[in-house]
Image: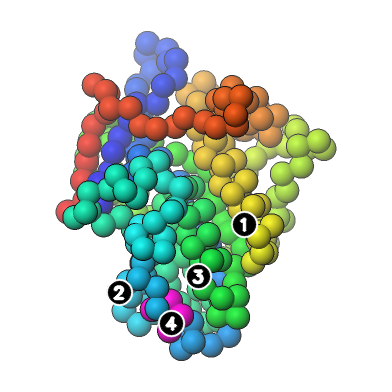
């Protein structure tokens, strides 16, 4: 899978080192998340998943969701019809465990695409979403570090079980995005959200995906200024400046002299 690196466009002091963030091969910044599903019967679940052409089983309990067939409408920055035929893009990696299915995902856009695919094509009696956890942080480093293949691969491919330790997550109080009452609230680095397996649940997940993406960008800009915290009030201002009058935003990758490319084998 191709890893791209782009310079973060932030005003820096002359003495500060330039930092760049990693992007995947469809131009979304890496943003790690995990979807949690519950199910009753493993054999029935496996059969339901195996019927879908975008699912490829790596072994009896592990599979990948590919950016094609039923999942080709995932809202990635590069549309499916612009992907070269020989390139295979993985949207998420699933693992079937005791009464639980987890799907690990590397960008906010892919998180939404996988959840929408599962909601549309896997019946709730087979598996239904219960929670998501997302880390709203860009993968960044100095230019020399990102150019190092081992460093960039380590950033892009964490151990999700360590990153999202379930015992630690269960004691977290779910955060709510209440703009009217909590404008000064600091947005945690890792947030856990309950998600209903309904249309309203998918709408909530779409909102969370968008907020996580912009929170990560704002978090890095603040860090470049020596500020560690991000508040909801800051996020709303940050987002308002980047949306046009139609509610759309442009985050497509621009190739320039600051853009380097790095690859996994």
Lower position in the chain sequence, tag 3 or tag 2: 2
Residue indicated by mark 3: 121
The image quadrant that residue 70 belongs to is bottom left
Answer left or right for 52 relative to 58: right
Residue 242 versus residue 213: which sits nearer the camera? 242
In this view, the mark in front (1 or 2):
1
Asked if residue 47 lies in the magenta stretch, the reply is: yes
Task: Say few, some or many: other residues with alpha carbon within 10 Å of mark 3 (under 14 / 14 to 19 / 20 or more).
Answer: some
Residue indicated by mark 4: 46
Residue indicated by mark 1: 202
What residue is rendered at 30% in x and 55% in y?
Answer: 89
Query: Between marks 3 and 1, how big is the CA–CA gap?
Result: 14 Å
Lower position in the chain sequence, tag 1 or tag 2: 2
Per the picture, the main secondary structure of the magenta-coloured stretch is helix
Q: Is residue 45 above or below residue 131?
A: below
Lower position in the chain sequence, tag 3 or tag 4: 4
Lower position in the chain sequence, tag 2 or tag 4: 4
Task: Say few, some or many: other residues with alpha carbon within 10 Å of mark 2 (under 14 / 14 to 19 / 20 or more).
Answer: few
Task: Say few, some or many: other residues with alpha carbon within 10 Å of mark 4 (under 14 / 14 to 19 / 20 or more).
Answer: some
């Amino acid at each position: 899978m191709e890893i791209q690196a782009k310079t973060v466009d932030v005003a820096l002091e002359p003495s500060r080192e330039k930092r760049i963030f990693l992007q995947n091969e469809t131009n979304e910044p890496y943003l790690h998340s995990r979807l949690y599903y519950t199910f009753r019967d493993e054999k029935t679940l496996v059969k339901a998943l195996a019927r879908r052409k975008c699912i490829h089983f790596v072994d009896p309990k592990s599979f990948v969701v590919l950016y094609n067939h039923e999942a080709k409408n995932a809202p990635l920055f590069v549309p499916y019809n612009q992907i070269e035929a020989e390139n295979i893009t993985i949207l998420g990696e699933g693992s079937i465990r005791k009464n639980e299915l987890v799907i690990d995902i590397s960008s906010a856009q892919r998180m939404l695409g996988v959840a929408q695919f599962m909601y549309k094509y896997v019946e709730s009696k087979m598996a239904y979403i219960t929670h998501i956890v997302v880390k709203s942080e860009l993968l960044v480093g100095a230019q020399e570090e990102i150019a190092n293949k081992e460093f960039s691969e380590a950033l892009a491919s964490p151990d999700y079980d360590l990153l999202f330790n379930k015992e630690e997550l269960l004691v977290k109080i779910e955060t709510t995005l209440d703009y009217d009452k909590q404008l000064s609230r600091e947005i945690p680095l890792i947030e856990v959200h309950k998600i209903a397996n309904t249309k309203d649940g998918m709408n909530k997940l779409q909102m969370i995906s968008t907020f996580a993406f912009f929170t990560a960008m704002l978090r890095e800009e603040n860090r470049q200024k020596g500020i560690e915290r991000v508040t909801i009030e800051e996020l709303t201002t940050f987002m308002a400046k980047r949306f046009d009058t139609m509610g759309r935003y442009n985050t497509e990758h621009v190739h320039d002299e600051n853009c380097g490319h790095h690859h996994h084998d």
